[in-house]
Image (cartoon, rainbow, N blue to C red):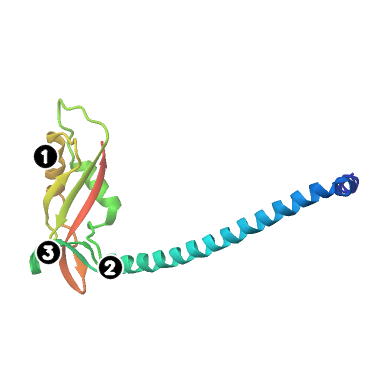
Amino acid sequence: MKSFKKVVVVSSGILLFSCASQKDVGQMQGKMETLEKEVSTLRAENKALTQAIVRLDERTSSIVKALSAPQSSQGTAENQVYSKVDVYPKYPGGDTTLFLDFQKEFKFPKDVEFKGEIVTQFVVETNGALTNFTFSKNTPKEFAIEIKRTLLAMKKWTPAVLEGKRVRCLYNIPINI
């Protein structure tokens, strides 16, 4: 059945071409020339785009190198707070222990209704203490106070390390209420 369809298609094409007038052939040749010009233009545009992508890739790679370098968000010398470090701060026992300890210690504020995610940001100091708390927008004050109290009541963290030295580091924790 498949070969029959191919034969019909091929024979139909031959029939169409054989019935074409000289005028039709001329129009087809004109269309072919137009298509060849368009293909040539598209190839030139493709080459230009490829070159632009290469230039963009070179810029991107220099940006990535700059971003992967240690970054300080504030301060001088010993007071710098880093967001990129060699070893990030860690809660004793890891993330699972952090969230289990948080659940044990956290007490829901009374008379405040809130449901959603609160992103808590703080600095893990070189001694493992937590400071400089900030909370995502629209965090009820009662929840911010309780989250801060809870985190301060928990174990001290292992601080971040950069180039073999303990450093202050920003840390974020998303908390779903």
Quadrant position of the N terminus in the picture: top right
In this rendering, does residue 93 appear at all? yes
The earlier-in-sequence mark between 1 and 3 is 3
Amino acid type indicated by mark 2? Ala
Amino acid type indicated by mark 1? Ile
Residue lying at 22% horizontally and 47% vertically, measured from the top left: 101
Residue lying at 31% horizontally and 65% vertically, measured from the top left: 63
Apparent side of residue 85 relative to residue 125 in the rendered image (left or right): right
The CA span between labels 2 and 1 is 37 Å
Residue lying at 12% horizontally and 34% vertically, measured from the top left: 142
Residue lying at 18% horizontally and 33% vertically, measured from the top left: 108
Task: Kindly indicate whether the residue at mark 1 contacts the one at mark 2 (C-beta within 8 angstroms).
Answer: no
Amino acid type indicated by mark 3? Gln
Q: Give percent across and percent down for residue 35.
A: 66, 54
Q: Residues within 10 Å of mark 1 (few under 14, many from 20)?
A: few
Q: Which mark is residue 80?
A: 3
The CA span between labels 1 and 3 is 26 Å
Q: Which mark is residue 145?
A: 1
The earlier-in-sequence mark between 2 and 1 is 2
Q: Residues within 10 Å of mark 3 (few under 14, many from 20)?
A: some
Q: Give percent across and percent down for residue 156.
A: 15, 57
Disc 2 designates what residue? Answer: 66
Q: Residues within 10 Å of mark 2 (few under 14, many from 20)?
A: few
Quadrant position of the C terminus in the picture: top left
The earlier-in-sequence mark between 3 and 2 is 2
Task: Kindly indicate whether the residue at mark 3 contacts the one at mark 1 (C-beta within 8 angstroms).
Answer: no
